[in-house]
Amino acid sequence: MVSEPPLIVTSANGPYQTFDAVRQAQGFRWGSTGPGAEDYVTASLLSRVFEIDAEVVTGFPGSGETELAILQGALDGMSGNPGSRRQAIEEGTQTPVLRMGEQPPSWLQADVPWVRDVPMSDEQRALIDAHLALIEIGRPLVGPPGMDEAATTCWREAMAAAMANPDLLAAAQQQERELAFLPGAELDTLVQRILSAPPHYRELLASMY
């Protein structure tokens, strides 16, 4: 229903106003709720793939507390979904330095680089591509394994109809919630991409939980 590839943001008052600056940091401090959370996994993966001298500070109850720590200067940056980052960015307390999604949100300035545009080796790109497939799943609706084919078809068609409903689309726009519907068959393809991820990516992912 919704795909919200995260944004990487830093303190607007800090020394890291670009992703290049983050990569060259010494002792960069990410904020996270804890291992297994998106803000932990993405931050950890970027640090390992791009060999960033960084630590992930955990234990924040939610993104609001992480944002406060960034504002106070206790943290340098975080990863989070674009909708939740929008207010801080527009208020000028956070700087977006990298987006994990190919298509930027409509409100985000166009010059924020996409992670795949960052120069990297083939090995680094394979790890990044595997992670992009994982986070692209976003917020799916799923059923049990071995679901009846007729029921699966019915549910997929019903969801496609619902997600094209003008009232739903108008409500989402009013609430500033961008929808990104992915039909079930395409979601299947995406899942297969994740299952075929390089072994090193699976090892990295397992170490973050």
Image: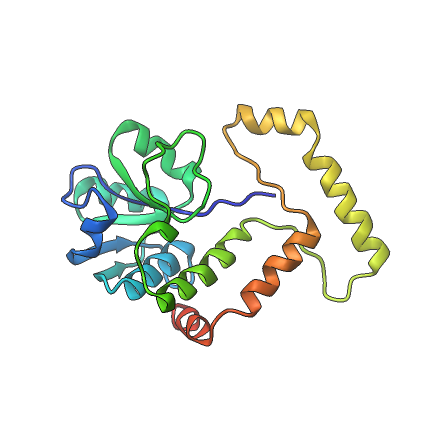
Q: Position of residue 79 (x, y in %)?
A: 35, 49
Q: Is residue 26 left or right of residue 136?
A: left
- How many tags in the picture? 0
Q: Is residue 196 left or right of residue 208?
A: right
Query: Which corner quadrant holds the C terminus?
Result: bottom left
The image shows residue 10 at horizontal and vertical percentages of 25, 44
For residue 97, what is the image quadrant? Answer: top left
**Residue 1 at x, y percent in the picture:** 61, 43
State the residue at coordinates (16%, 44%): 73
* Relative side of 5 to 179, left or right: left
- Give the side of residue 6 with respect to residue 188, left or right: left
Q: Seen from this angle, which residue lies furthest right?
A: 150
Q: Position of residue 189 (x, y in %)?
A: 63, 59
Q: Is residue 117 above or below residue 202?
A: above
> Who's the residue at 21% across and 52% down the image?
22
The quadrant where residue 45 appears? bottom left
Closer to us: 74 or 188: 188
67 vs 120: above or below: above
Which residue is more in the foreground, 64 or 118?
118
Residue 7 seen by the camera: yes
Please tell me which residue lies in front, 68 or 128: 128
Q: Residue at x 38, y 53 (%)?
A: 116
Q: Can residue 75 be seen in the rendering of this structure? A: no
* Scheme by which the image is coloured: rainbow
